[in-house]
Image (cartoon, rainbow, N blue to C red):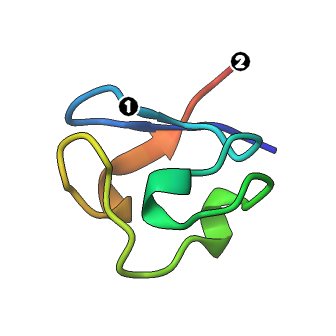
Amino acid sequence: MKKYECEICGYIYDPAKGDPDSGIAPGTPFEDLPDDWVCPVCGVDKTEFSVLED
């Protein structure tokens, strides 16, 4: 699964880790995150994330 980076603060969403503090289980693809999920560091929505190239 691809990782995604917040364009504002640089936070990396890693699907293998999920976002347990926000109730997102490990193994959750970015595309399956709820519409109201926000960056846990700076609070922007999913539209501010881009695919992290390998």
Q: Is residue 22 left or right of residue 19?
A: left
First in sequence, mark 1 or 2: give its number.
1
Residue at which label 2 appears: 54
Q: Where is residue 50 in the image (x, y as percent from the top left)?
A: 46, 43
Residue 10 location, x and y as percent? 33, 26
Q: Is residue 36 left or right of residue 2?
A: left
The residue closer to the viewer here, 19 or 5, is 19
Q: Residue at x 72, y 59 (%)?
A: 29
Q: Tell me if mark 1 has few (under 14), some (14-19) or many (20+) residues whose alpha carbon lies within 10 angstroms of its own.
A: some
Dot label at residue 34: none
Residue 12 sits above or below residue 41 on the image: above
Question: Which three-letter amino acid code belongs to the residue tagged 1?
Answer: Tyr
For residue 22, which quarter of the picture? bottom left
Task: Work out whether 24 lies above or below 49.
Answer: below
Q: Which residue is drawn at 81% across and 44% down?
A: 1
Q: Which image quarter holds the C terminus?
A: top right
User: Which mark's residue is nearer the viewer, 1 or 2?
Assistant: 1
Q: Is residue 54 above or below residue 10?
A: above
Q: What element carries label 1?
A: loop
Query: Residue tagged by mark 1?
Result: 11
What is the x, y in percent for residue 20? 56, 54
Q: Where is residue 51 in the image (x, y as percent from the top left)?
A: 57, 40
Task: Provide the secondary structure element on which disc 2 rests.
Answer: loop
Which residue is found at the position 70% from the left and 47% from the top? 15
The image quadrant of residue 28 is bottom right
Which residue is outermost to the bottom? 35
Which residue is found at the position 69% from the left and 61% from the top? 25
Residue type, mark 2 in image: Asp
Distance, label 1 to label 2, CA atoms, is 16 Å
